[in-house]
Image (cartoon, rainbow, N blue to C red):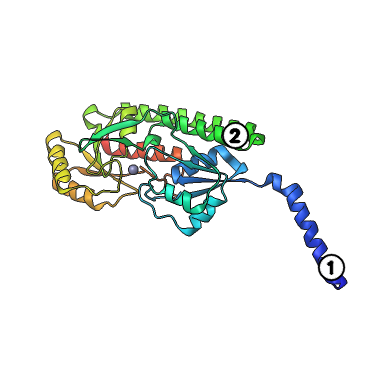
Amino acid sequence: MSRRIFLVAAAVFAAMLGASGGVRAAEPMKVAASFSILGDMLKQVGGDRVQVFTFVGPNGDAHIYEPTPADAKELSESKILFINGLGLEGWMTRLEKSSGFKGTVVTASKGIIPHKMVEDEKTITDPHAWQSLANGKIYVANIRDALIAADPDGKASYEANAQKFLDGIAEMETTVKEAIAKLPPERRKIITTHDAFGYFGAAYGMEFIAPESVSTESEASAKDVAKIITQIKKEKIPAVFLENVTDSRLLDQISKETGAKIGGTLFSDALSPPDGPAGTYLDMFRNNIATLSEALSS
Ligand SMILES: [Zn+2]
């Protein structure tokens, strides 16, 4: 080996030692989130101690998703996988298996009271628990506890970040309740594409009716659509709202046939891109409540 090559090799070796000594401690912990809303919560609580990979991104539909080989690679390198649970991510089991993931799976909704409904004589669990801010607090606490368990050195940081986030959620709860209290009671009943707002409705006193079920997997039948059209006319339901994760055609048609106006777009199962109107969990509520208030105030 010439002296020159030896020196280069020694320098590379020294750099590797440096990386394994000093730098590694500051390297963020890799964690994965199934969809954008959970991804934001994880970023808020984890701060710069975590590097978050999100499978279903902005405006994406978390009910139906086709994982890619890149997803499997990211998951295999993650220490914790955060999922919503309650039947939302039917595609996850296969991804977990194909990736050879060896980390911990954390169900962020653990401890919430599930909203169940009967459809076609079957009891189904509504997965959209994040649409209640009270449940959002439970998600945040579960995320905080899981991060502390995996990275005890970060305890103070995770606790401080979580507290700040919880304070923001509590503030938003007041904002949402005050805004809905201002709406005339007869206008607190609206239509969305799929049944994503059961928890929101129960928490804040609104009724959401949808031609599609709690999952976007199956399309609304002609019979379901006809039933809703009759109901809108009979109960004088004032508005239909589009969703950022669903096709607008069905509601355009319902709006045309009933005269109910299109009230705007609600963010149901995904955030907007970061520079959009609902780039974070709290901005999603801020945007949704502004959209509802504007369309439903008489
Ligand atoms: Zn949904």
Looking at the rendered structure, the kind of residue marked 1 is Phe
The residue located at (57%, 44%) in the rendering is 79
Within the displayed image, which quadrant is ligand 1 positioned in? top left
Residue 259 visible, this orientation: no
Residue at mark 2: 149
Q: In this view, does 270 lie to the left or right of 121?
A: right
Q: Mark number for residue 156? A: none
Q: Position of residue 202 (x, y in %)?
A: 31, 28
Residue at mark 1: 6
Q: How crowded is mark 2: few (under 14 residues within 10 Å), some or many (20 or more)?
A: few
Looking at the rendered structure, the kind of residue marked 2 is Ala
Q: In which quarter of the image is the C terminus?
A: top left
Q: Where is residue 161 in the image (x, y as percent from the top left)?
A: 57, 34
User: Which residue is more in the foreground, 142 or 284?
Assistant: 142
The image quarter containing residue 135 is top left
- Please, which residue is most extreme toward the right here? 3
Q: In this view, does 170 lie to the left or right of 234?
A: right
Q: Is residue 44 left or right of residue 283?
A: right
Q: Where is residue 112 in the image (x, y as percent from the top left)?
A: 41, 29
Q: In which quarter of the image is the N terminus?
A: bottom right
The residue located at (69%, 45%) in the rendering is 26
How many angstroms separate mark 2 from mark 1 (CA)? 44 Å
Q: Residues within 10 Å of mark 1 (few under 14, many from 20)?
A: few
Secondary structure state at the residue bearing disc 2: helix
